[in-house]
Amino acid sequence: MNTGVFPVEHVNLFNVEGALSLGRGLIQTEYRWSNLDLPTGENVTVEGGYVTARYMLTGEIIPYNRAAGVFGRVKPNHPLDVCKGDWGAWEIAGRISTLDLNPLFGQPGVPGKGRELTSSSVALNWYWWANGKCQFEYVNGQLNDPTLGDSETNTFASRVQFDF
């Protein structure tokens, strides 16, 4: 979503995030809001956030690196080896996210449109090895545009990834 470029006198950015690691499962969320003081004296708040849930169907642990503050890569208990009958690790995931820029709509000096986007997704992830995986995802997006009206998109995506 593009708001265009517009002047701002002052901005306060606020962010809250959290995660709950449950071994095989993980819930992660983040919420951000920005208070914008426009040159006209108006104060506008835009906001957005997401909630993600993941669960390892095959029993692997989703590791957390406390020093870096990030979740690490999933290492399959039984990496893909068809000859041995090992099929890697399987994970299901879901996410809901939203971004609300509608408060910007109609503000003097703001060339872009205000919009609100809400999306939800479900995914099936197949971890072949610690450095290789395949992802399958369905995403539904709902866009509220005050000038063009509401629209919806449905996306099916897949991705193959190898990293070293």
Image (cartoon, helix red, strand yellow):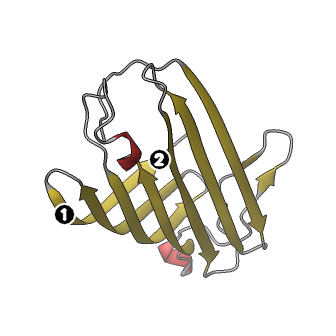
Residue type (three-letter) at the residue carrying disc 1: Ser
Query: Residue 66: where, in percent of width, then height?
Result: 85, 47
Residue farthest toward the front in the current orientation of the protein: 41
The CA distance from mark 2 to mark 1 is: 35 Å
Is residue 138 rendered to the left or right of residue 73?
A: left
Query: Residue 150: where, in percent of width, then height?
Result: 20, 63
Question: In the rendered view, would you say 128 is above or below 5?
Answer: below
Residue type (three-letter) at the residue carrying disc 2: Phe
Query: Residue 6: where, in percent of width, then height?
Result: 35, 21
Q: Residue at x 61, y 53 (%)?
A: 31
For discs 2 and 1, the disc positioned in front in the rendered view: 1
Sequence-wise, the earlier of marks 2 and 1 is 1
Question: Is residue 94 or residue 5 the one in the foreground?
Answer: 5
Secondary element at tag 1: strand
Residue corresponding to mark 1 = 151
User: Which quadrant, please, contains the C terminus?
Assistant: top right
Residue corresponding to mark 2 = 162
Is residue 85 rendered to the left or right of residue 152?
A: right
Residue farthest toward the left in the current orientation of the protein: 148
